[in-house]
Amino acid sequence: MKSLVPYLKNKYVIAILAFIVWITFFDSNNLIGRVKQAILLHDLKKQKEYYIENIHNDSLTLHKLKTDTAALEKYAREKYLMKRDNEDIFLIIDERDK
């Protein structure tokens, strides 16, 4: 501790320490805020990639449904449980999934 006292009396060391404290906590672009913004930016980029991938998959599905009537019928049967007039649908619900 006694070896630090001469350095703490130096005006340049005091100025540098004050600058570091100011930049870290009090400035409008402080380090803490910058780190939070970098984390937020990373999360938003992940979300953007997720949504772009979903848009691509949905556009492929939409194109397939518009061009192929068998695919449209299969989609309607699986997604909306539609059936023909002479058919019965039996739903098997797995109790382990709940």
Image (spheres, helix red, strand yellow):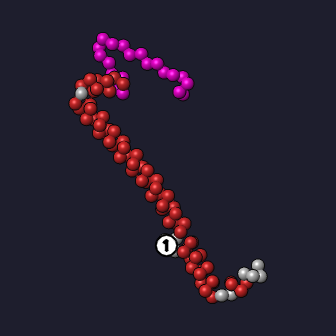
Q: Nearer the viewer, residue 53 or 79?
A: 53
The residue labelled by disc 1 is: 28
Residue 64 is situated, as x and y percent measured from the top left of the image, at 26, 32
Quadrant of residue 57 in the image?
top left
Decide whether the magenta segment is chiefly helix, strand or loop: loop
**Judging from the image, what secondary structure is the residue with disc 1 in?**
loop
Q: Which residues are magenta?
A: 79-98
Q: The N terminus appears in which quarter of the rendering?
A: bottom right
Q: Confirm whether the magenta stretch covers residue 86.
A: yes
Residue drawn at the location 77% of the way across and 82% of the way down: 2
Residue 82 is situated, as x and y percent measured from the top left of the image, at 33, 22
Residue 52 is situated, as x and y percent measured from the top left of the image, at 35, 46
Residue drawn at the location 42% of the way across and 16% of the way down: 90
Q: Is residue 52 above or below residue 9?
A: above
Q: 10 left or right of 68? A: right
Residue 13 is situated, as x and y percent measured from the top left of the image, at 63, 83
